[in-house]
Image (cartoon, rainbow, N blue to C red):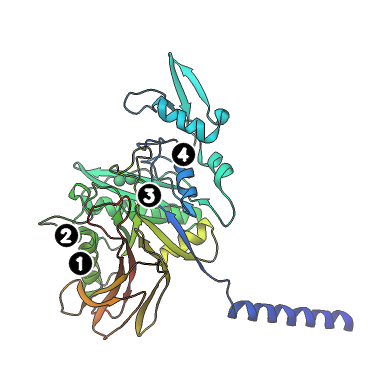
């Protein structure tokens, strides 16, 4: 009996020590590179999904969300081989066969037409996923419209397809979509991210739409498709100006939460260089302990990520006093960090400080509603969204104070 008690005591003691040490030294978080918005032949992308997956995996991405329009990559889908619209051209099929081998595709003949079967996500996982190296997270572009205004959201890490909800107005549609995603998260018990896509594409979403739909917490500050109008125009704000408008209004007046900004490709074209939408223009770097769909999604939901079109950061940290950034500098390049924020009663989206070099810290004065940052390098992207672009990283806003 005494031995038994002593063993129990020792076991308890050892467990306690292990837990104490583990609590003080949590597994280190790493940055994982991923894209949450990309298309394949499952909808209007021009490549079979394995071609897309191969592109991302071989270009250093850790995770990928295939986000086709109102469809998951599951079930049976055949695409005609040919040169008509929505068909897969034989010269491209030849490239796929050269890359993956003659037996890599499944084809059939229907009404005198050859067809190609698309790989499902389950099949793609078997070929491409590697623990700690490459992961798919299931996704969909919930593609909806209100009176011809296109409103697109990406949902990430859901289990079931989420059909477009429709709505009585732009904002009502946005709210209904967010509610549908929330219901899916509750039903499955899994973290699910939903982000608003390309708000400036065809000038669909106004800054007020985004500000007043308080449940809308994530949006594409950078969508790599060249027709997404991230930069705005003479009369309409850029997505960055939109971001400041939303943050200033929500934190200064509406009692809302922060809006986080993502970078994505929204790639549709994999066979033409310098096309409207190519892979590799915009991505997110997410900080998480491990490469796991729920963990990555939770980190995105918590805002523990930054968006990038080329700049890599070593660290982003903030406390009550300051926001600090360390750039993983490339030799021969220079970096400028711009801290942007809105002070209580001040100009919306004011440049608060500009710092040259690969280390930058901004000390809060105390009257800022929020402070965010962009880091711009001296290098232009090889396949830019816009010819005037320099590689950039977008750091998430930090709330300093609220006036409501
Ligand atoms: Zn879209
Ligand atoms: Zn898209």
Rendering quarter of residue 13: bottom right
Which of the two labelled residues, at mark 4 and mark 2, occupies the earlier sequence position?
4
Q: Nearer the viewer, mark 1 or mark 4?
A: 4
Q: Is residue 89 above or below residue 1?
A: above
N-term-proximal mark, 1 vs 4? 4
Of 278 and 387, the residue lying toward us: 387
Question: Is the C-beta separation of discs 4 and 2 under 8 Å?
Answer: no
Q: CA distance from mark 4 to mark 2?
A: 36 Å
Within 8 Å of ligand 2, the CB of disc 3?
yes
Q: Nearer the viewer, residue 304 or 374?
A: 374
What is the crowding at mark 4: few (fewer than 14 residues within 10 Å), some, or many (at least 20)? some
Q: Residue at x 53, y 35 (%)?
A: 100
Residue bearing the label numbered 4: 51
Q: Could you tell me which secondary element the residue under label 2 belongs to? A: loop
User: Which residue extends farthest front?
Assistant: 332
Q: Residues within 10 Å of mark 1 (few under 14, many from 20)?
A: some
In the rendered image, which residue does mark 3 sit on? 37
Gap between marks 1 and 4, in whole Å? 39 Å
Whichever of labels 2 and 1 marks the residue nearer the N terminus, that label is 2
From the image, tell me which residue sits under label 1.
245
Give the answer, above or below, for where 84 lies relative to 236.
Answer: above
Q: Position of residue 139 (x, y in %)?
A: 43, 48
């Amino acid at each position: 009996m005494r031995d038994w008690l002593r063993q129990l005591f020792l076991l308890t003691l050892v467990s306690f020590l292990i837990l104490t040490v583990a609590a003080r030294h949590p597994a280190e978080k790493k940055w994982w590179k991923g894209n949450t918005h990309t298309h394949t032949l499952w909808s209007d992308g021009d490549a079979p999904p394995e071609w897309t997956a191969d592109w991302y995996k071989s270009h250093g991405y850790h995770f990928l969300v295939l986000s086709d329009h109102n469809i998951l990559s599951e079930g049976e889908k055949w695409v005609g081989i040919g040169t008509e619209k929505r068909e897969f051209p034989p010269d491209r099929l030849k490239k796929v066969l050269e890359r993956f081998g003659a037996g890599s595709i499944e084809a059939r003949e229907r009404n005198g037409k050859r067809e190609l079967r698309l790989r499902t996500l389950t099949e793609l996982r078997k070929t491409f996923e590697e623990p700690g190296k490459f992961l798919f997270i299931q996704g969909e572009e919930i593609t909806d419209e209100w009176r011809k205004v296109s409103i697109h959201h990406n949902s990430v890490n859901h289990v079931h397809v989420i059909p477009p909800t429709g709505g009585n107005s732009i904002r009502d549609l946005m709210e209904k979509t967010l509610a549908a995603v929330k219901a899916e998260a509750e039903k499955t018990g899994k973290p699910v991210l939903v982000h608003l896509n390309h708000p400036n594409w065809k000038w669909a979403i106004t800054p007020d739409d985004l500000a007043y739909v308080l449940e809308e917490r994530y949006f594409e500050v950078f969508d790599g498709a060249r027709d997404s109008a991230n930069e705005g125009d003479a009369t309409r704000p850029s997505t960055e100006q939109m971001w400041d408008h939303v943050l200033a209004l929500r934190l200064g007046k509406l009692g809302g939460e922060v809006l986080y900004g993502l970078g994505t490709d929204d790639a549709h074209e994999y066979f033409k260089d310098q096309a409207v939408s190519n892979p590799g223009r915009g991505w997110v770097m997410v900080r998480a302990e491990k490469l796991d769909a729920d963990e990555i999604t939770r980190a995105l939901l918590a805002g523990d990520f930054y968006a990038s079109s080329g700049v890599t950061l070593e660290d982003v940290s903030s406390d009550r006093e300051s926001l600090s950034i360390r750039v993983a500098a490339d030799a021969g390049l220079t970096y400028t960090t711009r801290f942007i924020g809105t002070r209580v009663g001040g100009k919306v989206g004011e440049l608060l400080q500009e710092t040259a070099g690969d280390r930058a810290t901004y000390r809060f004065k105390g009257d800022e509603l929020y402070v965010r940052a962009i880091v711009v390098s001296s290098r232009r992207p090889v396949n830019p969204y816009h010819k005037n672009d320099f590689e950039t990283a977008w750091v998430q806003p930090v709330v300093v104070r609220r006036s409501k």
